[in-house]
Amino acid sequence: MKRLTRLGLAIVFLGLINFAAFGIDSLLLGGDAVHGKVENERYYVGNHGKYTEVPKIAWHYSAAHAASISATGTLTMLGGLVLLWCQQLARYSTRVSPSRQEEKQRDEKERGEVP
């Protein structure tokens, strides 16, 4: 269970880091390639209708990073679901059902452990 929890935490952490890195990249470049354009072999990143010319490599990097957000966003949500599932499983595995609790009390009485 600990391994699964650690895996879920790692996936969520990496997804959030990737999302933050994309935001920082967009701020530094002045936008992103998804909202940008290419005209006459010139590459522009876009942000709310404002375009900033960037080198070709920066535009392609921005486009690839934007594509990775879709994948890591989905993985981050799945990692969160894994964490939620582990938490619920841990919560319910520590509970004792009423019938099991009665059986345990009866066994303790038979052994003389409970007055």
Image (cartoon, helix red, strand yellow):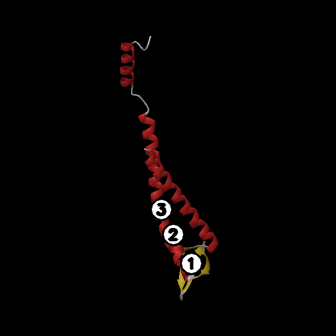
Q: Is residue 34 visible?
A: no
Q: Quadrant of the N terminus?
A: top left
Q: Nearer the viewer, mark 1 or mark 2?
A: 1
Q: Secondary structure at mark 3?
A: helix
In percent of width and height, residue 80 lies at 48, 51
Q: Which mark is residue 27?
A: none
| Label 1, label 3: how far apart the Cα atoms are | 20 Å
Amino acid type, label 1: Ala
| Label 2, label 3: how far apart the Cα atoms are | 10 Å
Which residue is pictured at 37% across the width and 14% down the height? 111
Is the residue 115 above or below the residue 92 in the image?
above
Is the residue 29 above or below the residue 43 in the image?
above
| Label 1, label 2: how far apart the Cα atoms are | 12 Å
Q: Secondary structure at mark 1?
A: helix
Q: Residues within 10 Å of mark 3 (few under 14, many from 20)?
A: many
Q: Which residue is mark 2?
A: 66
Judged from this view, the residue extending furthest toward the top is 115
Q: Which residue is mark 3?
A: 72
Amino acid type, label 3: Thr
Q: Which residue is mark 1?
A: 58
Amino acid type, label 2: Ala
Instruction: Of the two numbered discs 1 and 3 on the same chain, state the one appearing first in sequence.
Output: 1
Check whether the beta carbons of the residues at disc 1 and disc 2 lie within 8 A of each other. no
